[in-house]
Amino acid sequence: MAALTPISRKPFWLVALVVGLFGAFIGLFVGTANGSGPIGAICGAALLVGLAFLYINVLKDERAGRGITFAGLGIAGFAGAGIPGAVLGAIFGAVGGWMIYWIYEGRYRSYLPPYLTAGQVLWHYAFRVICGAIFIFLITPILVVMPLSFNAENFFTFTPEMLRFDPEGYSLKHYRDFFSNNEWQRSFKNSLIIAPIATVISVSLGTMAAIGLSQSHVPARRAIMAILISPMIVPLIISATGMFFFYSQFGNWMESTLGLDKNLVGYIKVILAHAVLGIPFVIITVTATLVGFDRSLTRAAANMGADPITTFFRVQMPLILPGVISGGLFAFITSFDEVVVVLFVGSASQKTLPWQMFTGLREQISPTILAVATILVFISICLLTTLEMLRRRSERLRGMSPS
Amino acid sequence: MSETTHTGPVLAADGTPLKKSLARALRVEKMRALLMIAPLLLFVMFSFIWPIGEMLFRSVDNREVGEVLPKTVAVLKDWDGTSGELPDETVYQAFTADMLVAIDAKQHTKLGRRLNFEKTGISSLFRKSGRKIKKLDLETDGPFKEALIKIDKKWGDVETWKAIQTHSVNYTNGYYLNAIDMQRTPEGVAVQSESKRIMMTLFKRTLWMSLVITGMCVLLGYPVAWILANLPARSANLLMILVLLPFWTSLLVRTSAWKVMLQQQGVINEVLVWLGLVATDDRLVIINNATGTVIAMTHILLPFMILPMYSVMQTIQPTYLRAAKSLGATNWTAFWRVYFPQSIPGIGAGSILVFILSIGYYITPEIVGGAKGVFISNRIAYHISISGNWGLAAALGAILLAAVLVLYWAYDKIVGIDNVKLG
């Protein structure tokens, strides 16, 4: 982006004010770790203001100034707290050195419209800080869970060893527990049985219905759509209550009349319940994909003698596949994450991973939950990446440039 | 060459009138579409709509009493409970006859449990008396009034009979009355006794906290949506990951993260103590109360607010704002009079979505809410799995469902259900 505003050097008091505040903020943490917060804050502020004064009035060489701050604070950190101290010190030094020149040279103005007043510039950056704080709020829980899952102790906070980056403080024991504990393994297996089967049911029925719904003459389309979307609209607790009544009778009927095994009936109940919950997602994504589908392609195929089934699998399916897969991913994650319905409909032998986590959180909370949570976060990152790639592919197929 | 006159209908290739042929083609097309939809529609009807209907039915269904005590219910109809006198011998005889059948079928304890929801103590009365009534003989052991009162003096209490009489109708409004802290009495509808009054508190709390959560989501979501819509596409896409990642992370993962963070010995309290902002023995209590629920649920529902707001704000032209400013508006005026009104549809869509989701939430309040932060949905779960008062659970569910449907109707009017987008 080209600069919008010609920049000029700023008075020293402005530099001192901003870098002083930044130094005090970082100094507060360093000071607290070493005994006294306020002293740390004052030292941090004094250090940065002093450096700024030196660089501006004595050194007058930006590269040297930034290099000195970066290296100097890194070495100071190393002397104070070893390698982790060096890393944190170097980061602090790099940011501090950059900030001194960023303010002094007036670079913060260069990409803003020239007519802004000082107050507006301040608000511009304050707004960014607020947004940054909200983004941190969004992401912190996930960031906290990941390191804590490697905790060597059975605590839910960062131990002093962890903060010192001492290898002693970290271990994989919660992960080992997850992979060796029978209860966790059984619930993980149950999730891996239930979610894929439920997904296959909702994707196959859902795709067919979505294609039917996208035909030009469908009687009562709105009503049908409302019924098919309803599992997403009705709060889970209500769906679960209704299904609880229904499936207890349905299960009894399957056991007594059809003579099925009790365990198998339990799985069938949960799978059917989850399949219904996944359907709206498949319907929505596949209908959205079909909106851009060029109908003349199927007509051309029919014209050349293909029967409807061949047309579907050779022409239509490959084109709408991204939509179908992302609908399937939504259905999968719905079932994989679902607790309320399985809690009401399933019995103990169908305990899924979220159910196991739920009982763990309610009763004896064990750090293994954090290890499981980290694994689940990893799975959702993979799914998110897949979805994004599919979205781009779908846009390319339709001849749009991916954004 | 003879001249042909086309006075008849236009014909298709096979000789049928074109109109008829087209109508047939349309019919075939409609049938084909319906056939493709049918399996799914039947599946959803069978395993979703039907269960919901059954739940609605259960919220008024009260045939249990009449089925177990058919004779008693018939003769009790003529008894005037308000007179303060005990029913006469015919009622006691009919009751003994009914009970003997019920005890054989092991139905009497079930009935006792049903009536116990209305009047505490009846369950044990039925269970204990059941063993002794079993030994009575209909032919020889009369009169039954004395016999029953000898077995348990509660049978000589007018209130017991009043409870049976009041709850003997086949279809009752009793569960709905209980759901709003009222009760069915022989004298008509009355307010629930003080100790049992909890539902209205929960309904009010559910509404109030959902409003607070929605408000928090608007406050936090608006700046984020704004910055996402106004940054260059590349950086906006990067920041979008920070919104989508929590959105895609398992609900249980986020709830456990908040449990870990908010605990007394949790991350937030430890950091505050470490910084010296809070004394060790004076740690913040931010879990197992309303604060915990609001914090955790705001975080969980925030993406549902940001995404609709973002899609609306993307369509607002930045030139409008610049035009307003060039006409002399201050920053605030330009935002408030030009930008904000255009972003209201996004706020509306996000708010209704978040509100609907939060009034039906169960998992998060259950884990971080404690006693002071639970919602009406937790009460439903309690009645399903612990107390066994399924009728009341169904009635609560029906009320909640009605509220949600009204809100969705509003959502459809304002935003349109077809505009629901994912990811």
Image (cartoon, coloured by chain):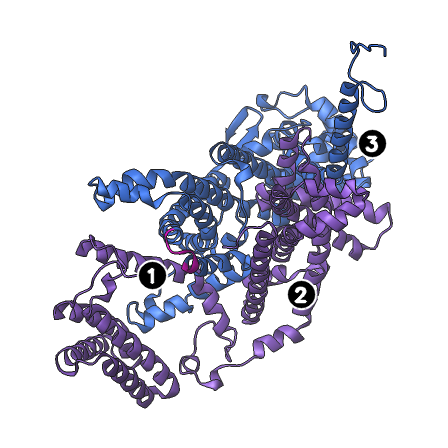
Chain colours: A purple, B blue
Q: At 42% across and 38% down in the image, what residue appears?
A: B345
Q: Amino acid at mark 3?
A: Leu
Residue A392 in picture, x, y percent from top left = 56, 56
Q: Is residue A194 left or right of residue B412?
A: right
> Front-most of A221 and B4?
B4
Q: Quickly name the residue at label 2.
A: A188
Is disc 3 on the same chain as disc 1? no
Q: Secondary structure at mark 2?
A: helix
Residue B52 in picture, x, y percent from top left = 65, 38
Label located before the other in sequence (1 or 2): 1
Q: Residues within 10 Å of mark 2 (few under 14, many from 20)?
A: many
The quadrant in which residue A69 appears is: bottom left
The quadrant in which residue B98 appears is: top right
Q: CA distance from mark 1 to mark 2?
A: 49 Å
Q: Quickly name the residue at label 1.
A: A1
Q: CA distance from mark 1 to mark 3?
A: 98 Å
Chain letter for the residue marked with disc 3 in the picture = B
The quadrant in which residue A262 appears is: bottom right
Q: Residues within 10 Å of mark 3 (few under 14, many from 20)?
A: some
In the rendered structure, which segment of residues is drawn in magenta?
B230-235
Residue B91 in picture, x, y percent from top left = 72, 26
Residue A6 in picture, x, y percent from top left = 20, 62
> Front-most of A221 and B181?
A221
Q: Quickly name the residue at label 3.
A: B138
Nearer to us: label 1 or label 3? 1
Q: Amino acid at mark 1?
A: Met
Is disc 2 on the same chain as disc 1? yes
Q: Amino acid at mark 2?
A: Phe
Chain letter for the residue marked with disc 1 in the picture = A
Chain letter for the residue marked with disc 2 in the picture = A
Screen quadrant of the N terminus of chain A: bottom left
Nearer to us: label 3 or label 2? 2
